[in-house]
Amino acid sequence: MLLDKIIHIFLPNRCVCCNQVISAQSSICDDCANGLDKVSGKLCNICGAPEGSCDCKRHPKWFDRCVSPFYYNGSAKLAVLNIKHHKIKQTADFLSKYMAQSVLGEYCGMTFDCIAFVPMFKSKQKRKGYNHSRLLADALSQYLGLPVIDVLKQTVSAKPQHLLPAKEREQNVSGIYSVVGDVFNKNILLVDDIITTGSTLSECARVLRLEGAAGVYCVTAATRGKSKEK
Ligand SMILES: [Zn+2]
Ligand SMILES: [Zn+2]
């Protein structure tokens, strides 16, 4: 107990979303807990966005389905940005706990062979020091008891998707990924931090399917389907 207090003085516990110092017993501050915007209502049964707000009918996706626990706003957005810019394991653990709930609830009764994650271009990852999708995948594997496979590679540099208009995103990621391991007949859970148009996940799913993956089901921490901050 005394040791816990001493650790807290020198290494204060911080909120996984906003990073402010909080008591050692919790992982999230009250404000951020209240600001979590969980997905709700009628959702597209392919990409998980609110019904009518996606382009799945005009642009079919290569993945089977995508689920996410949160909308990309409020404190979930802070948490996603946190792991995008800093390698904070506690934040990845927090998000992946909810991602695991989405998987167990929405993909109920399904069995997966492994977890794959959206890769990062080699030089970019070297500069950054880690891949935040891998950070989420590793944390999720502890909740789901599934192995993480490092089979997807980004072999061509591309512009960051979030800087491009929706219609250019599909073209931007076309042909930039390849598979470097055995995925034949495997039912794969594919992880990323956020789904927007779904182009990145769809392109990853396309190359996995080309190599014989039996199924590609996605889970992301957040979906940009709806925003309270219009
Ligand atoms: Zn907070
Ligand atoms: Zn959709």
Image (cartoon, rainbow, N blue to C red):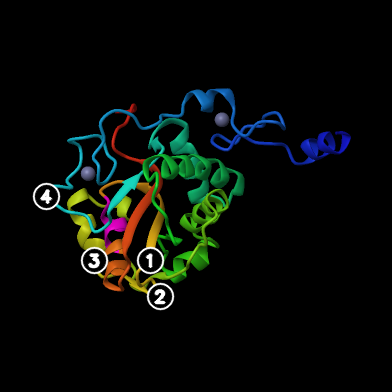
Label 4, ligand 2: CB separation under 8 Å = no
Of circles 4 and 1, the one toward us is 1
Instruction: Tell me, for residue 182, which label it has, or none.
Output: 2
Q: Residue at x 60, y 49 (%)?
A: 89
Instruction: Tell me, for residue 159, which label it has, or none.
Output: none
Of circles 3 and 1, the one toward us is 1
Is 183 or 163 nearer to us in this picture?
A: 183
| Residue 205 position within the rendered picture, expressed as x and y whole percent measured from the top left | 30, 62
- Residue at the extreme front: 109
Instruction: Tell me, for residue 174, which label it has, or none.
Output: 3
Is 98 or 195 nearer to us in this picture?
A: 98
Q: What distance separates the C-alpha of mark 4 from that of mark 1?
A: 28 Å
- Name the residue that disc number 4 marks: 58
Ligand 1: quadrant of the figure: top right
Q: Residue at x 67, y 32 (%)?
A: 21
Which structural element holds mark 4?
loop
- Residue at the extreme right: 2
Of circles 2 and 4, the one toward us is 2
Inspect the image, locate mark 3, and give the three-letter code of the amino acid beneath it. Ser
Q: What distance separates the C-alpha of mark 1 from that of mark 2?
A: 9 Å
| Residue 20 position within the rendered picture, expressed as x and y whole percent measured from the top left | 62, 32
Residue 51 sits above or below residue 221 on the image = above
Inspect the image, locate mark 1, and give the three-letter code of the amino acid beneath it. Lys
- Name the residue that disc number 1 marks: 186
Q: What distance separates the C-alpha of mark 3 from that of mark 1?
A: 23 Å
From which residue to which does the magenta span run? 198-203
Which structural element holds mark 2?
loop
